């Protein structure tokens, strides 16, 4: 999956740091990311290439000794040799650890941008000096990076797997699994039951955890579950959420693992007959 960057190791421990000329800089603007992308190979600017005199760098994380910083006050004029790309380009870019860095930086940049002012009193927020946190000196409000828990659900019926396609997503051709965010006061298992009932009208049982994945595109921690249909297998689609819901026999599943998403890994695990049993 996209976070599997071994032999590189990700260290997100926050300390205030100042970049050197060789440190990587991540820059985002209007939904785009400044980078060089040539033949699928990804490169980010280094701090020494940023000539902006009032540059405001924020330390993000380190990957195997390589430090990454965020340029928070932009670079409107761009940078010679680099171009603006959608962060989704990180999904298939090489080296993989830089793709992971690009989307993780995207999540943190979005968090910083969304919390410039206090949501309680409206005063400007200030960065903390000891941890990754923003605080309001007026009302003492503290805000930490947003992580939204959600579920990916592989609903099975013996040798069959339920695959779906999202509604209102032009150009979507690949199948997916039932998915959704956890609501306040709800366990992950209850989220599984609710989302499956809401999206495809099915009851489920034997809910079992598979694994999780940080998904920075939506600031989500995705938790994967397998479960069995309980009773009637007739699908009733929520057409506001889904365009397609179909049962596929194991040998007829049309997707393979893409090495990026938890969804595709879970589909491939079932296709190979290696899903966790009740």
Image: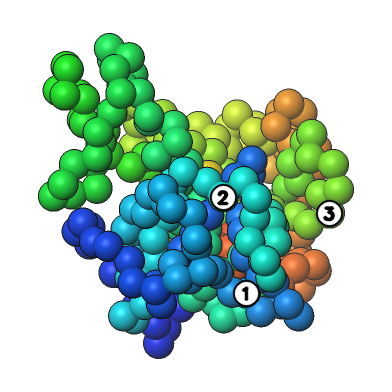
User: Residue farthest to the top?
Assistant: 121
Q: Residues within 10 Å of mark 3 (few under 14, many from 20)?
A: few
Q: Is residue 115 above or below residue 3?
A: above
The kind of secondary structure element at disc 2 is loop
**Left or right: where 141 falls relative to 164:** left
Mark closer to the chain start, 3 or 2 = 2
* Residue 139 visible at all: yes
Q: Position of residue 31 (x, y in %)?
A: 63, 44
- Mark number displayed over residue 75: 2
The kind of secondary structure element at disc 1 is strand
Mark 1 sits on what residue? 42
Pick whichever, 7 or 45, lies toward us.
Answer: 45
Mark 3 sits on what residue? 173
* Residue 24 visible at all: no
Q: Is residue 133 above or below residue 248?
A: above
Residue 147 falls in image quadrant: top left
Mark closer to the chain start, 3 or 1 = 1
**Left or right: where 36 falls relative to 218:** right
Q: Is residue 145 above or below residue 139?
A: below
Pick whichever, 219 or 172, lies toward us.
Answer: 219
**Left or right: where 195 falls relative to 199:** left
Which residue is pictured at 53% across the width and 54% down the height? Answer: 27
Q: Residues within 10 Å of mark 1 (few under 14, many from 20)?
A: many
Mark 3–mark 2 contact, CB under 8 Å? no
Which residue is pictured at 24% across the width and 48% down the height? Answer: 132
The kind of secondary structure element at disc 3 is loop
């Amino acid at each position: 999956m996209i976070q599997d960057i071994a032999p590189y190791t990700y260290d997100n421990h926050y300390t205030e740091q100042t970049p050197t000329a060789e440190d990587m800089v991540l820059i985002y603007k209007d939904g785009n990311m400044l980078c060089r992308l040539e033949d699928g190979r990804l490169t980010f600017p280094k701090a020494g290439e940023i000539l902006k005199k009032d540059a405001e760098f924020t330390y993000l994380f380190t990957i195997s000794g390589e430090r990454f910083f965020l340029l928070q006050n932009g670079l409107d004029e761009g940078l010679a040799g680099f171009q603006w790309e959608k962060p989704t380009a990180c999904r298939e870019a090489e080296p993989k650890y830089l793709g992971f860095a690009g989307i993780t930086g995207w999540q943190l940049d979005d968090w910083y941008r969304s919390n410039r002012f206090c949501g309680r009193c409206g005063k400007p927020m200030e960065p903390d000096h000891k941890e990754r946190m923003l605080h309001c000196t007026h009302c003492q409000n503290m805000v930490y990076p947003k992580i939204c828990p959600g579920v990916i659900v592989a609903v099975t019926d013996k040798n069959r797997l339920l695959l779906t396609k999202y509604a209102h997503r032009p150009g979507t051709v690949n199948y997916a699994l039932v998915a959704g965010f956890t609501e306040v006061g709800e366990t992950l298992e209850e989220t599984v039951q609710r989302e499956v009932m809401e999206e495809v009208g099915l009851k489920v049982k034997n809910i079992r955890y598979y694994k999780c994945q940080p998904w920075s595109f939506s600031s989500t921690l995705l938790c994967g579950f397998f479960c069995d249909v309980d009773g009637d297998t007739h699908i009733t689609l929520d057409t506001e959420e889904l365009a397609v819901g179909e049962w596929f026999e194991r040998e007829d599943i049309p997707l393979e693992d893409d090495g990026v998403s938890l969804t595709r890994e879970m589909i491939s695990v079932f296709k190979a007959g290696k899903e966790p049993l009740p």
